[in-house]
Amino acid sequence: MEFRPATDTDRDAWQAFLQSTSSGDFLHDWAWADVAAFDGQPQRRYLLLEDGVVVAIAAAQERSLVAGRTFWYVPRGPVLDWSAPEAAARLRSLLIGLRIAAKEHHAVAVKLEPRLVAGDAATALLDARRLRHAPDTLQVGQTRLVELSDDEALLAEFDKDTRYGVRRAAREGVTVTVIEDATDTSAIDALHGLVGETQQRAGFPMPPLERYRVAWSALAGAGRAAILEARREGQLLASGMVVIEGRRSYYLFSGSRREERGEPKRYASYAMQWEMMRLARDRGVTEHDLWGIAPPGAGPEHPWHGVGLFKKGFGGEEVVWAGSWDLVVDPAMYRVRRAAGMMRGWLRNLRR
């Protein structure tokens, strides 16, 4: 096996492997490095090859610590075929390579957060490597996955209120337009504006417009993203961005306008999500990731409760991710960092 950094000449092989592997995720898309760099967490990409063929990839986002030290984070990775007979040997080689590379670049540890469901047998491979496991994740820890099929079968999986919303939107004259031109900044700017309205209602912090522009330019520029706009009589009511990676799609950014008091409900978000699923399906996608819901058992007080109910209406399966595993490179510094994090958490709780 050969472990090495990925170069620009590896882009096509990287993307082909990512899109053909079930544990692949758009956070490992080659183009996502632009977003990571905007966030101040530049990526270091690594490949594992057997006889010159890619068998595993890892995109580590480098986070700066004090005194020139760093902490690496591998979101939804590493990516490999966890069910393959060679998976354990490949994981071992990958971890050895990552440990050496991380040490060379003064990293304290590497946090791995693979796209594995809680309870998946493959998690035993990570546990066998004596990594530090935590059930929580830096990404949203749970989602809904919808299997895409023909229109009739899809609608049958929706709950009755969601089917009503999709049909009512059509009767209300809501139409959905697909934008794929990466140079069309008006579409991403309008989406950001609607997200701002939605986030403000929910009390969430608002990501900067430039981050949305970077994501749109990178992913749409690579032909892997589209914005869907739901309008009625020319007025933008809902907008959302979908990312397509091989046979999986992701409902990434979205926002909607709330009707004024006494104004009829137009169900534009239902129309937008319905058309997003159909667009993805028509491009060969078999699984749609609704990307983030409230944790199991969370009640109405949880800030994601409402959006979780909306997504639940589209059917699918609720999934909880398996968590994260830390590959410790510098044990002493790792213990110091963990102690500092625990102290910050204690102080936060003390102030409440």
Image (cartoon, rainbow, N blue to C red):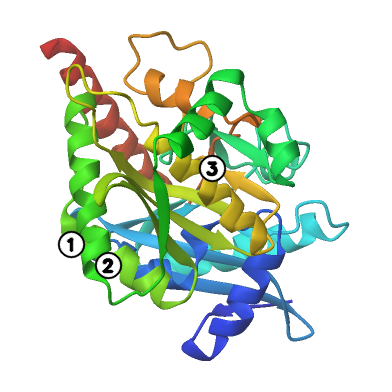
80 left or right, relative to 112: right
Q: Amino acid type of disc 2?
A: Val
Q: How crowded is mark 2: few (under 14 residues within 10 Å), some or many (20 or more)?
A: many
Residue at image position (52%, 80%) is: 6
Residue at image position (88%, 57%) is: 85
Question: Does the residue at mark 3 contact the one at mark 1 (Cβ under 8 Å)?
Answer: no
176 left or right, relative to 257: right
Where residue 223 sits: x, y (%)?
A: 48, 75
Q: Amino acid type of disc 1?
A: Glu
Q: Nearer the viewer, residue 235 or 35?
A: 235
Q: Amino acid type of disc 3?
A: Trp
Question: Does the residue at mark 1 contact the one at mark 2 (Cβ under 8 Å)?
Answer: yes
Q: Quadrant of the N terminus?
A: bottom right
Image disc number at residue 210: 1
Q: Distance between the residues labelled 3 and 1?
A: 28 Å
Q: In which quarter of the image is residue 280?
A: bottom right
Q: How far apart are marks 3 and 2 (CA)?
A: 26 Å
Residue at image position (73%, 39%) is: 152
Query: What secondary structure is found at the residue carrying circle 1?
Result: helix
Above or below for 154 versus 230? above
> Which label sits in the foreground, 3 or 2?
3
